[in-house]
Image: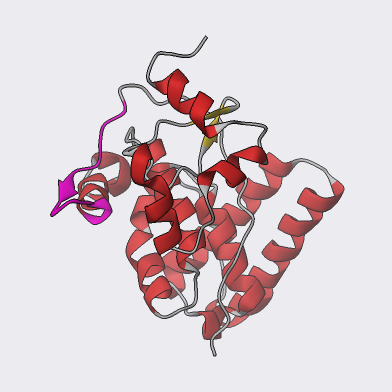
Amino acid sequence: MKNCLLLIVIFGTFACKNTGSVPVTDGSIDISATIDLIRQSDRVKNALDGFQMITVDCDSMISLLDEAYRKDQEVRQQGGDMQLIDQQNQKVVVSLIEKCGFPTMEQAGQHGYTAIFFVLQHSAGGIIGRYYPPLAAAVERGEINKSTFALMQDRLLMNSGYKQVYGSQIMNDQLYELQAPETVNERRAEVGLGPIEAYLKYFNLDFEKEMERMNGRGE
């Protein structure tokens, strides 16, 4: 059985205006169609404009990614300049992918794959969109959990001005705009996520109150 990537994801706090809805096809929310549109945008096509690549050796991929994973875990567990570490790790990961291609878990190692996902998850929407296809392929291979990938899909949608579909993203201590909230738990169950009511309790949020706020009925 292949090892699956399962992560605790830290949620960003930034503003997106005029959130759009993801189209519905045959009664189901069509995430793929929307992400295809996002990937055609200049924001994704030009995601690496001005990016500072570093010199990397493809033969040292595992050791470089293991070091990125170690630094990531250290700063999150012991404190420090998280933004600086994220920037350093992003240079390593993006430079490796651009020079060596997007690796499989066998090529990168378990910790290395975790480092790649962490870095991309916490990157701008353009970078997530650029590497979305190989990430989706990794899900199909069983190397990334569907539940973990759902959080990245929500984040990409949010970064690109669309409503999220799994209810995983919190912005400014509030649930970010959610599409079709009446069926969110069905979608969450399909990818292995628990009920949104229990999830939001971790953030001291109440789902019904969040829905009232989004519908303009909150205080």
Q: Which residues are magenta?
A: 19-32
Q: Looking at the picture, does residue 150 appear above or below residue 109?
A: above
Q: Is residue 26 magenta?
A: yes
Q: Looking at the picture, does residue 69 appear above or below residue 46?
A: below
Residue 71 position in % (x across, y down): 75, 58
Residue 66 position in % (x across, y down): 69, 71
Quadrant hosting residue 112 = bottom right
Q: Residue at x 38, y 54 (%)?
A: 186
Visible residue check, residue 112: yes
Q: Residue at x 69, y 64 (%)?
A: 69
Q: Looking at the picture, does residue 18 appear above or below residue 180?
A: above
Residue 80 position in % (x across, y down): 81, 42
Residue at the outermost top position: 219
Q: Is residue 197 magenta?
A: no
166 to the left or right of 87: left
Q: Residue at x 68, y 76 (%)?
A: 63
